[in-house]
Amino acid sequence: MEGHLLMSRKERERQSVFGRVKRKELRLTEASELLGVSYRQTKRSYGRYVKEGDRGLVHRGRGRESNRKIEAEVKARALAYYVEKLEGFGPTLAAEKLAEQGLVVDHETLRRWLVQAGLWQKHRKRRAHRQRRERRAHFGELVQMDGSPHHWFGPDGPEYTLMNLVDDATGTTLSLMAEGETLEIAMRTLWRWIECYGIPKALYTDKKNLFKSEREPTPEEQLAGEKPMTPFEKACTKLGIEIIRAHSPQAKGRVERNHAVYQDRFLKELKLRDIKSIEEANQLLKATFCDTLNDKFSKPPREKADYHRKVPKGLKLEEVFVHEQRRRIANDWTISYGANLYQIHADNRPLPKPKDHVIVRTSLEGKMSILYRDKKLLFAPIAAPPPKLKPVAPPAPSRPKVKTKPPQTHPWRKNITHLFAEASNETRTV
């Protein structure tokens, strides 16, 4: 018995795609596009898969140190010399100057070192010339996503948002309505797309921080080697969906133009059926309206192969589309979350230690769970202790008022005596 075979997410994805190639559902050229690698590499990897099975997909260098790894001493000397002599130099010129000192480092390697050390920042490239982009060739290769705020129930009604998904290759559309363009409606719309068609290869979104985070990593994330991600981005990462950000509304013109179709046809359909609530509007979208639009306006893709993937076995979508936050366990095995306290039971196995981190996961329905090492813990809510009252200091005693009587030598008394003397002399003279 050979035991278990550890495979990364990328290797499991290759296993799934090569399985479809073996069953004659895909050609190698289509598999190379789906995996994002060259045809030559795809052919070589598929040959190892046919010859060795799943073991042939495991990377040969796993667990081995790279033969081209640069020693840490060389990196430290290069960065020290850059700080001392070459501050402000670009990576290419700096690499040439380091080579003159006997420190031969590729300019891209040096650029990566400098960015990691905070000594260099990426520079914006000049705006590229825009030209009309051809549709993608495969269904599920790229799906555009955007929200359409509008007065859907008439000009006098409130403004709600229709979250819309449009396949770039076929124009197939799917949408749901909510009060605003929130994380929940974005997750629910993508969830429904996956249930209907499968997991797409990539999503094309705008630059809202709902979809992808731009903040700097926290110290804890830096120590853990993690990059900051939004809950939507985490869900897409678990599903292997690439998020591509559009730099202008024109770049995602497919979904922008599709908004006009909804604002014409869907608006009139709502008025015709006298629908005035979000719940009834979503029932109409799920039942017939989206299917009617697709039957009328969608077109077949240029290539027959479907780039959607099935949900991996054992992966539950209700555990993917969730809110996740990291919390630290207190010394009494409690955590604080949402202004509430939760007690972790002692019979958990494994039992986390105080100061360990756990993941608090909240589903879209509001169900909460606590995970430690990817295992759910038993816990219970407890009453929060009353806040500690600060001791009130007694008021400071007031000082008694003391009536002061100026002495005889006080300048005020002298001035008064002098005036009385002058008045007495004038009276005698008269």
Image (spheres, grey):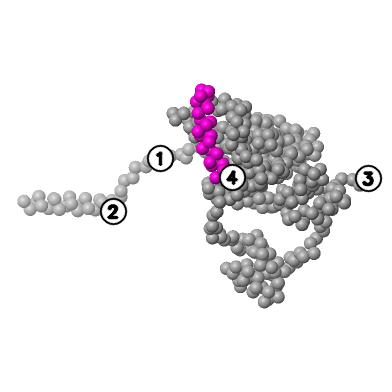
Q: Amino acid at mark 1?
A: Pro
* Picture quarter with the N terminus: top right
Picture disc at residue 400: 1
Residue bearing mark 3? 1
268 inside magenta stretch: yes
Which mark is nearer the camera, 1 or 3?
A: 3
| Dominant secondary structure of the residues highlighted in magenta in the image | helix
Q: Residue at x 81, y 57 (%)?
A: 61
Query: Quick one: SS at disc 2?
Result: loop
How far is mark 1 from mark 4, CA to CA?
Answer: 75 Å
Q: In the orientation shown, which residue stands out farthest toward the top? A: 274
Q: How many marks?
A: 4
How far is mark 4 from mark 2, CA to CA?
Answer: 90 Å
Which residues are the magenta region?
A: 253-275
Q: Amino acid at mark 2?
A: Thr
> Which is more N-terminal, label 4 or label 1?
4
How far is mark 4 from mark 3, CA to CA?
Answer: 47 Å
Quadrant of res 385: top right
Name the foreground residue: 22 vs 66. 22
Q: In the picture shown, does residue 122 fall above or below 33?
A: below
How far is mark 2 from mark 3, CA to CA?
Answer: 114 Å
> Which is more N-terminal, label 3 or label 4?
3
Task: Check disc 1: other Cα within 10 Å, few if <14, some if 14-19, many if 20+.
Answer: few
Residue bearing mark 2? 409
Name the foreground residue: 342 vs 16. 16
Picture disc at residue 205: 4
